[in-house]
Image (cartoon, helix red, strand yellow):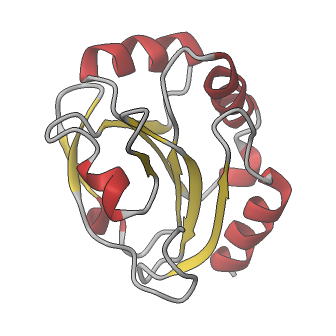
């Protein structure tokens, strides 16, 4: 079960696709669209992030983060293929899945992050969560509406 709406989003620091450290709390003051996903280059993940990269306007003003257990080199290639320059792809690689576990988004038997999206407001509070099976996509319309409400 995902973390609850109304709770503070656990802070974390992970390495991005460039090898730079990114900390969630560095984005305080801005809404965050936090996506956990199983694997770069998988069909569902590719479709999901293509939609985010192609339709940037609903995410304008928000920080978009994608987290998987892939390494930074895989994420760099994925980011380039997706042409998702505004997305922060983070490697939850070592220890494997630690942040995904903290967000109740880790699939122990598969050794991967599941598919779970959090909308976090500018104060770091979770305002919406959508956790779905790995072969499904989150309810983008609902999550974008929640993100829009954060921007007001």
The vertical placement of 47 against 131, above or below, is above
Instruction: Please identify the quarter of the rendering in which residue 19 is found.
Output: top left
Query: Residue visible at 63% across and 30% down?
Result: 49
Q: Quadrant of residue 13?
A: bottom left
Residue 57: horizontal and vertical position, in percent?
Answer: 75, 46
Is 50 positioned to the left or the right of 87 in the image? right
Q: What is the number of callouts on the image?
A: 0
Which of the two residues, 49 or 68, is positioned nearer the viewer here? Answer: 68
Residue 58 location, x and y as percent?
Answer: 75, 52
Position of residue 11 measured from the top left corner of the image (x, y, whole percent): 26, 68
Q: Is residue 109 above or below residue 57?
A: above
Residue at (75% x, 38% y) in the render: 136
Residue furthest right as drawn: 141
Q: Nearer the viewer, residue 22 or 68?
A: 68
Q: Which residue is pictured at 40% across the width and 63% down the height?
A: 103
Q: Quadrant of residue 96?
A: top left
- Left or right of residue 96, residue 128 in this image: right
Q: Quadrant of the N terminus?
A: bottom right
Which quadrant is the C terminus positioned in? bottom right
Give the percent coordinates (x, y) of residue 48: 69, 32
Taking the spot 49% from the left edge, 37% from the top edge, the residue there is: 87
Farthest residue, direction front: 109
Compare residues 65 and 102 and report the one nearer the observer: 102
Give the residue at the far bottom of this rendering: 6
């Amino acid at each position: 079960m995902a973390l609850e709406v109304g709770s503070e989003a656990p802070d974390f620091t992970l390495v991005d696709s460039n090898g730079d450290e990114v900390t969630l709390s560095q984005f305080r003051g801005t809404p965050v669209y936090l996506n956990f996903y199983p694997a770069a280059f998988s069909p569902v993940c590719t479709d999901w992030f293509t939609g985010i990269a192609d339709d940037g306007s609903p995410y304008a003003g928000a920080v978009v983060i994608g987290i998987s257990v892939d390494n930074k080199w895989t994420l760099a290639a994925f980011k380039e293929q997706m042409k998702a320059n505004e997305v922060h792809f983070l490697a939850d690689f070592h220890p494997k899945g630690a942040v995904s576990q903290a967000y109740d988004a880790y699939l122990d038997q598969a050794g991967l992050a599941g598919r779970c999206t959090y909308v976090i407001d500018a104060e770091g509070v979770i305002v919406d969560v959508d956790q779905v099976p790995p072969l499904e996509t989150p309810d983008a319309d609902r999550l974008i509406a929640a993100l829009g409400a954060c921007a007001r």
